[in-house]
Image (tube, rainbow, N blue to C red):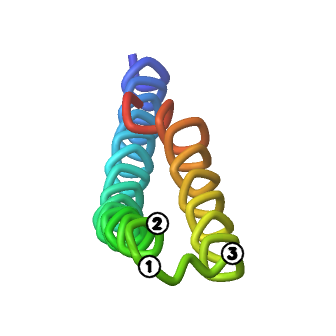
Amino acid sequence: MEELAEERASKLRDAERLVAIGATAGMIGHDIRNPLQSIDGAIYLAKDAVISSSVNDAKQKEILDYLNMIAEQVAYIDHNGLGPARFC
């Protein structure tokens, strides 16, 4: 009887740890997504301004494209790396 109680207590502790890990991963994902959305919006507006400007500087567009690629990579990492952990 005592062994059964100890085993159940151990399983409960393990489950609580997994819940805490999942909650932490969700918070980290949230903290990544919020500024990422702001960056993405700023890149979109800057890119639109460069494209519609009479002075279409190719270097500016290249830099904005690079920043957009980085933002997409971070979003991919968040979605594929932290996504599964949110459901623990």
Amino acid type, label 3 = Ala
Label 3 CA crowd tier, 10 Å (few <14, some 14–19, many 20+): few
Camera-nearest residue between 15 and 43: 43
- Looking at the picture, does residue 68 appear above or below residue 58? above
Q: Residue 17 appears at what percent x and percent y?
A: 43, 46
Which is in the foreground here, disc 3 or disc 1? 1
Q: Quadrant of the C terminus?
A: top left
Q: Could one spot residue 86 in this view of the protein?
A: yes
Q: Could one spot residue 35 in this view of the protein?
A: no
Residue 46 numbered mark, or none: none
Amino acid type, label 2 = Ile
User: Helix, strand, or loop for circle 3?
Assistant: helix
Say whether residue 27 is left or right of residue 79: left
Residue matched to label 1: 54
Residue matched to label 2: 51
Label 1 CA crowd tier, 10 Å (few <14, some 14–19, many 20+): few
Q: Residue at x 45, y 28 (%)?
A: 11
Camera-nearest residue between 55 and 84: 55
Residue 58 numbered mark, or none: 3
